[in-house]
Image (cartoon, rainbow, N blue to C red):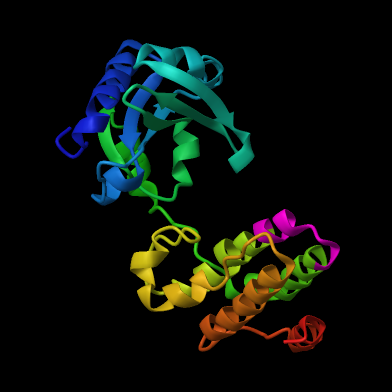
Amino acid sequence: MSMIPEHLRVVADNVVAEAERDPRVLAVLAGGSVATGTSDEHSDLDLVLVCTAEGQPTCLAEAKEFAGRVGPLLTSFTGEHVGEPRLLIALYGPPLLHVDLKFVTPDGLRTRVEDGVVLWQRDGTVDRIRQEGAPAWPQPDPQWIEDRFWCWVHYTAVKIARGELFEAIGALDTLRSAAIAPLATLGRTARPAGVRRFETLAPDLVPELRATLADADPEDCLRALRAAVDVYRKVREGVEVVRRTAAEEAVVDFLGH
């Protein structure tokens, strides 16, 4: 496991040891920064446990107990909030360490965003599945973004007008992560993920994205929203979309921009 950073290795080793003792588990894979070779001292540990189809439901039901056996578990919870009920998110420590444990079946592994690094496997199940098809990382859909952006901007403007400033600040975050950053990093990375690593992927746009941050002040929120419109229009240039011009003009007029 030389590819596993030292601060992640003990838990990774313990997960593999527990998996080897459980006949329901067929393999353990490491994803995320371990799979891409970009781990650093701040990296989390993303693990996928491939279970038999018959054993996966009970493995998932017992996930918290499993997590408690592999390290000093502080808290854990399942991933419904990110649309992934097969996921257990765990915090260990001290020292503090975030670990994701996802329990999938062999069929569930067929639709995947990355291959990951095989830390251990009981048989050739993972190898066979990999031969059947390649992983696919979700890519931004510029038309999906354009269809929604102007409605989102209007929503944010109304929240500012009502004085719901913290709601407006949250909406500005959505504009950055779901619209501006995906278009800005299009073609700059094979693994787009909202504003993650924006500083290194699009350093030329950092000052303009910084301008979309706002204090809990109506005038500052409105200034930031206008800045978001400006940077969105900039990153949209050269991207092939059917522009929602009528919506754009009406919303921009509403902003007095």
Residue that protrudes farthest toward the right in the picture: 162
Q: Quadrant of the C terminus?
A: bottom right
Residue 86, position as x, y percentages in the image? 54, 31
Q: Is residue 157 left or right of residue 96?
A: right
Residue that protrudes farthest toward the left in the picture: 2
Q: Is residue 74 magenta?
A: no
Name the residue: 51% across, 23% down. Answer: 76
Q: Quadrant of residue 204?
A: bottom left
Name the residue: 28% across, 51% down. Answer: 36
Whether residue 208 can be seen here: yes
Residue 186, position as x, y percentages in the image? 45, 73
Residue 237, position as x, y percentages in the image? 53, 88
Name the residue: 23% across, 28% down. Answer: 9
Residue 3, position as x, y percentages in the image? 18, 40
Secondary structure that dominates the magenta span = helix
In this picture, which residue range is highlighted in magenta?
Answer: 161-170
Q: Quadrant of the N terminus?
A: top left
Q: Is residue 35 left or right of residue 135?
A: left
Q: Nearer the viewer, residue 184 or 106?
A: 184
Q: Nearer the viewer, residue 7 or 191?
A: 7
Relative to 146, residue 4 above or below: above
Q: Nearer the viewer, residue 169 or 73?
A: 169
Q: Nearer the viewer, residue 240 or 212?
A: 212
Q: Quadrant of residue 32?
A: top left
Q: Quadrant of residue 80?
A: top right
Relative to 173, residue 121 above or below: above
Name the residue: 59% across, 63% down. Answer: 178
Whether residue 122 can be seen here: no
